[in-house]
Every structure is written in C-alpha cells, then in structure tokens.
Amino acid sequence: QVQLVESGGGLVQTGGSLRLSCAASGFTSGNYAVGWFRQAPGKEREGVSCISQTGGTYYVDSVKGRFTVSRDNAKNMVYLQINSLRPEDTAVYYCAAKYSLPWNLCVPMDGYTYWGQGTQVTVSS
C-alpha cells in the first residue's frame, strides 16, 4: 500500500525556518517524482516545489531562494527546507508523488497520484 506521511510543520515566527519531511512507503520513491503543494484557507492548492527522480528541482517564484527541496532515495525520504518564512506561507503543506522515468522532469505539477495527509505550517507576524 502506497503511503506518504508528512511531518515537521508547526508554528513559527516570521523569518523562522522549518524542515518538512515526507516519508514514502509501499513503493520505491526513487522511481517517482515528488512534489510539495500547499493550500491556505480559502485559496486553491498551489504547487510550490518538486524534485525529479534524478534530483532536478523546480520552485514557484514566490519561494525561490527560500525553499530547498531534497531527497534521500536510500531512506525513501524527501525534504523541504523552508527559510525566511512569511505569514503568507501559512498553509497546509502536502507532499505528493507520481511515477517518473529517469529523464522526466518533475514539472508540470500535475498528474501527482499519491498524496500525504498534510502538515500545518503557521507563520505568525
């Protein structure tokens, strides 16, 4: 059974940092691209970052320079380091995975098949 579990969210002050983790089980995450999405109250879900099977990355403009995605295929883990947090980063953050081939990019950020339950990030001003 495929499962993704996020952790690492919390309440931080503006300018703070968090490291979100996404633990994959039930499949070999090395064969998958993994994306990070977020959804703030009253807003649509937004794809913020992703990492391909071979480590290629993508970031939406609003998080470039502040967010860093990485993966450890040996541990079936994907991470999202988020620095210089802003109140507008407040959202539930989800990781998601889709099967990919080695030459595939992780974008566009659609077609992600497997989803975690989300972890809440709240940034106080």
Image (tube, rainbow, N blue to C red):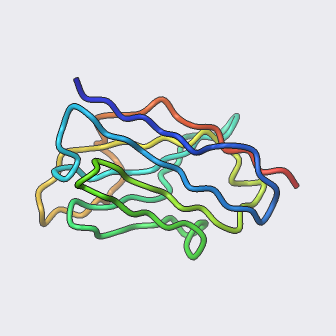
Task: Where is residue 32? Give x, y as percent.
Answer: 21, 49
**Left or right, 34 with reference to 53:** right
**Viewer-nearest residue: 29 or 125:** 29
Which residue reaches farthest top?
A: 1
Name the spot of residue 27 as percent of width and height, x first: 18, 37
Q: Is residue 39 above or below residue 80?
A: above
Going 17% across and 62% down the picture, which residue do you hit? 104
* Placement of 88 over or under 98, stated as above or below: below
Residue at x-position 58% and y-position 66%: 63
Asked if residue 36 lies left or right of residue 8, the reply is left
Above-or-below relation of 12 to 2: below
Q: Quadrant of residue 66?
A: bottom right
Q: Is residue 117 left or right of residue 33?
A: right
What count of labels does the image hold? Answer: 0
Q: Is residue 42 depicted above or below 46 in this figure? A: above
Locate residue 108, reporting x and y percent: 32, 57
> Residue at the spot x=55%, y=72% of the render?
64
Q: Residue furthest right?
A: 125
Pick the residue in front: 76 or 96: 76
Q: Residue furthest front?
A: 75
Q: Residue 96: percent from the left, percent from the top?
A: 37, 42
Report the quarter where the C terminus lies.
bottom right
Question: Is 54 positioned to the left or the right of 11 in the image?
Answer: left
The quadrant holding residue 49 is: bottom left
User: At x 31% / y 34%, what residue is drawn?
Assistant: 114
Which quadrant is the N terminus positioned in? top left
The residue closer to the viewer here, 96 or 28, is 28
